[in-house]
Image (spheres, helix red, strand yellow):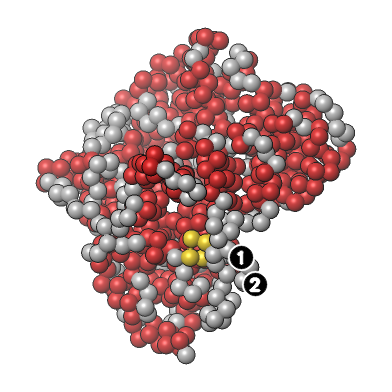
Amino acid sequence: MKFRVIVSLFASVFVTLATVQPSFAAPSGSNAQADAVITDMAQAFKRGDRKRLTALLPQAKGHTLEPWAAYWELKARLDEASSQEVRAFFNRYPATYQEDRLRNDWLLLLGQRRDWTTLSDEHPHYRMRDDRELRCYFLTIELLEKGPQAGASIADEVRKNWMGMREADDGCTLAADRLFFTKQFTALDIWRKARLMVEHNRPRTARNAVQIVAPDAANVVPDAINNAEKFLAKHIAAPQKVRQELVVMALVKIATTDPDKADKLMRNKWQPYLTTEERHWVWGVIGRQSAMRLDDDALTHFARVAHDKDLNDDMLGWKVRAALRAGNTPKWPVVENAINAMSADARKDPTWIYWHARALLARKKVTQPIQQEANAMLEGIAGVRGFYEQLALEELGRKVTAPARPPAPTAEEMEVAKRNPSLQRALYAIGMGLRSEGVREWNYATNLVNAEGKAGLMSDRELLAAAQLACDNQVWDRCINTSERTRQVMDFEQRFPMPHKDAVVARAKTINLDPAYVYGLIRQESRFVTDARSGVGASGLMQVMPATAKWTARKIGLTSFTPDQITDRDTNIAIGTGYLKLVLDSFEGSMPLAAGAYNAGPSRSRRWRAPNDGTGPVLEGAIWAENVPFNETRDYVKKVLSNTTNYAALITGQPQSLKARLGLVGPRDATAPAENLELP
């Protein structure tokens, strides 16, 4: 009966909304024919059609997006271009995103060519400074100049950049090779990079690392990775460093797909032949993979590691997660010790600050100094900016409220934003359908340079004005992202806009769905871009998959639905909210479980909760969310719930609780209605 009521309500409230498209004023001198030239060049650039680009470039002269056209043409043949051509481009388009983008591309090419003199000369003019490989080239120059006298800070920066890069790159690999040659990197530094790349299934990058430390063994790496079990079977144990490390890599590879098998191999054969550090690393990978599978024995694997310091931050993070979900009461001492073992940078993450404070407060005896320390941690992150910031606020006894709105940008501030050439080009590109190019230019103008286009940061007032310019043009994703960059002031209505408010709120309330939850989800799914399309085919405001749309349309009574309607705003909202309501009901009203199901599929959300036999623990919603195995979905669930809480504060004007929305997550209630197993 309940389901029939929902269908009836959907059928009755399906209304057609007037479609509102962003309007972008075309600058003088631009017309449809000129725009077509730019579009043609964009497509030719993606195809790598150099001849077409060169032929069309003269027709782009004088167009608002001429710098893009010139960039595409020169970038396509940069490997053959002369230095004079490149510098002529810089002089023709000074202080533009395209100038700095081409300089970034050129500097990378100079690094690959080992043209250190030109690289050094051009470095001061480079504004973005956000390319890790290029940064490694600059550090290599310092290493070549200073040799063994180079400071430890250079080695630390190279290590951080190199370890954080998964793809095979030349710049950081070169810097690491140089540091190993000067004995500022140890062999263990290099082998740990190789192990990490095996964990992330990057065999080529792993091989490049081994080439530094053991060039004769580099050709064996593919065999150790691609045929790990056979490799281990045909190699006898031997106290030889290179062979041991190849064994470690093979064990790591097996552990990433079958931690139980790796556990048996370690206990039955390999553990005695590895060093303490090597054993700990393998057990750390096994523990992490078991924790990601939500296995009950994850902490048993981690317990074989005597020194948490032998684990990296990722392993320690999963040890914390496993300890949090170890029962109705988390294993707080394990949580505390694992977080203490993390690097200084990792411990700054609000995630671990929050759980560290909770672990301190859960000690058997909480002294006044301990209470003060925990409260100081929570106060340090408490606020409305994100998931753990909101939880910290509630832990301190305060609710989530919308902050007072700052004064709106003045006419003068708005005029500065409107005159910004990069923002003008970005809006024009987005209006033409060149969203990727427009977003990149907008991000450059608001994230990497100041209002004058020079290296630096925009002020908060300048960011608010730029965000408002995007809002006024209904470019909601740039409105939100730019407003989020303010440091001291916060405009909630910019950060959490509500396009189509009357229709969304009315539709949600009619089917008993929290409108704040709908907005929280749309904000995370599409940033209100009506024609958004994901890499896997999800479309529209609520990012609905074609098969899901067809199934849901039938369930909610949209008998006239056809696949081409999926990006229609009205239809997308109707189907998206309909599906969300069905998912939420299927998970007994649990917002975190439903958000996880919306992103990763209902079957996964079912697997990630406690077994239905009633034996599993009942977890805080925050603990369940933190243990979601997929990085994307874990981040998604937390952001949707955080967004929802902030939207509720805006919509109601009343203090809100994130904890109340998270609730508890445990085995399915035996008295609940039957679960809808049809959900796609």
The kind of secondary structure element at disc 2 is loop
Q: Tell whether 532 sits left or right of 257.
A: left
Instruction: Give the answer, above or below, for where 182 lies relative to 94.
Output: above
Distance from the alpha carbon under mark 1 to that under mark 2: 8 Å
Let me know if residue 505 appears in the view. Answer: yes
The answer to which of 86 and 504 lies nearer the viewer is 504
Point 87% across, 41% down: residue: 233
Q: Where is residue 604 in the image (x, y as percent from the top left)?
A: 59, 64
Point 75% across, 51% down: residue: 260
Q: Position of residue 494 (x, y in %)?
A: 25, 54
Instruction: Give the answer, above or below, for where 633 lies relative to 92.
Output: below
The answer to which of 479 and 53 lies nearer the viewer is 479
The kind of secondary structure element at disc 1 is loop
Q: Where is residue 281 in the image (x, y as percent from the top left)?
A: 68, 37
The answer to which of 460 and 623 lies nearer the viewer is 623
Instruction: Give the answer, above or below, for where 525 lies relative to 56.
Output: below
Q: Which amino acid does label 2 sit on?
A: Asp
Instruction: Give the answer, above or below, for where 436 lies relative to 664.
Output: above
Farthest-out residue, left: 411
Q: Which amino acid does label 1 sit on?
A: Gly
**Do the CB atoms of the residues marked 1 and 2 lie less than 8 Å apart?**
yes
**Dot 1 crowding, Cα within 10 Å, few <14, some 14–19, many 20+:** some
Point 47% across, 57% down: residue: 622
Could you say which disc has been placed on residue 208 in the image?
none
Quarter of the image containing the C terminus?
bottom right
**Residue linked to disc 2:** 613
**Residue linked to disc 1:** 616
Q: Tell whether 208 sits left or right of 436.
A: right
Q: Where is residue 177 in the image (x, y as percent from the top left)?
A: 61, 20
Let me know if residue 575 appears in the view. Answer: no
**Dot 2 crowding, Cα within 10 Å, few <14, some 14–19, many 20+:** few
Point 73% across, 23% down: residue: 215
